[in-house]
Amino acid sequence: MKKLYSALMTAFNDDGSIDEAGIREMVRYNIDVNKVDGLYVGGSTGENFNMNHDQKKRVFEIAIDEAKDQVDLIAQVGSLDLNESKELAKFVTDLGYPKISAVTPFYYNYTFEEIKHYYNEILKGVDNKLLIYSIPALTGVSLSMEQFGELFENPKIIGIKYTNADFYLLERVRNTFPDKLILSGFDEMLLPALALGVDGAIGSTYNLNAKRAKAEMIAFDEGNIEKARQLQKESNDLITALIKNDIYPSLKLVFNEMGVHAGVTKEPMAKPTPEMRAGAEKIYNDYLK
Ligand code: SI3
């Protein structure tokens, strides 16, 4: 059975502090209403790269305290400060996270040897399993099939969160490493990723749209491709509207519209404008009600 994970958002107050109650509400909504299989904590959607060290730790604590062991939890610990990544990897492992993930190090055009060193260092002395977070559009880092293979030489590296529209590479990686866990990261491309044999998906829009995405996975598994295509079309109408309205603030605005307190985004991400608020209300009424 393929697994669906929501990329957990972080509720912030206007001053950039963490809204703990909001985070708990979103965890609960994902477990109780969305019935997701898991949560990806501290990813792009969680605005992890906007947070300071203490905030990252606090979000990890709140999420696992609320979710307990009701769903699978993956903690994204990647950081440009390798010492921070190592500390966070130990911290979340001690908290009980069954899996970790780390974004490829970015900005300084690291060599592959440096990237490999980063992953192996994060895992040194940490009794946990790791998913490589590959998102070339945001990091500028594209790993080849051979490079994934070299990273997999570390037995603790169990798979990839694959946020990449390169389906040729996905096919090569899937078939070369049939035992690795590959979770697709582009919600709008779930169906082609399913066709290439991913084990599930992690995404931002599943916070709002998990039921449709789950139904699409089931339709795909049953061989009902027409139904899966129709569901992907409906999802993409929603995702297109969210992207046009500025996706991160809009996901929160729509959650707030649904009565789930998601707070606001953290600067420098845009704060909601009146136009965004109106757009979010329309998205809720048009696609989710
Ligand atoms: O938290 C995370 O790391 C993610 O949710 C990554 C995920 O792949 C999302 N990518 C980004 C850059 O946010 C997608 O879910 C994305 O928002 C969605 O496909 C819309 O483009």
Image (spheres, helix red, strand yellow):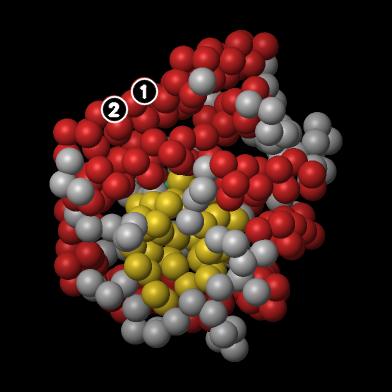
Residue 156 as seen in the image, left or right of residue 169: right
The numbered mark at residue 233 is: 2
Numbered tag placed on residue 12 in the rendering:
none
Q: Amino acid at mark 1?
A: Asp
Q: Quadrant of residue 83?
A: bottom right
Location of residue 72 in the rendering, given as x and y in whole percent from the top left corner: 53, 63
How far, Cα to Cα, is label 1 from label 2? 6 Å
Q: Position of residue 115 (x, y in %)?
A: 44, 71
Horizontal arrangement in the rendering, residue 107 relative to residue 223 (left or right): right
Which residue is found at the position 39% from the left and 85% from the top? 155
Quarter where residue 29 is shown: top right
Residue 167 placement, left or right of 58: left
The residue shown at (68%, 33%) is 260
Bin the neighbour count of mark 1 within 10 Å (Cα to Cα): few under 14, some 14-19, many 20 and up.
Answer: some
Does residue 213 show up?
yes
Q: Which residue carries the number 1 mark?
A: 237
Up/down of 87 relative to 239, above or below: below
Numbered disc 1: secondary structure = helix
Ligand 1 within 8 Å of disc 1? The answer is: no
Q: Position of residue 152 (x, y in %)?
A: 34, 78
- Total residue callouts: 2
Vertical arrangement, residue 113 with respect to residue 236, above or below: below
Residue 136 seen by the camera:
no
Q: Residue at x 80, y 32 (%)?
A: 14
Q: Are marks 1 and 2 in contact (CB under 8 Å)?
A: yes
45 horizontally vs 117: left or right: right
Type of the residue with mark 2 = Lys
Where does residue 173 sit, x and y in percent of width and height?
Answer: 23, 65
Looking at the picture, tell me which residue is in the foreground, 236 or 152.
236
Give SS at disc 2: helix
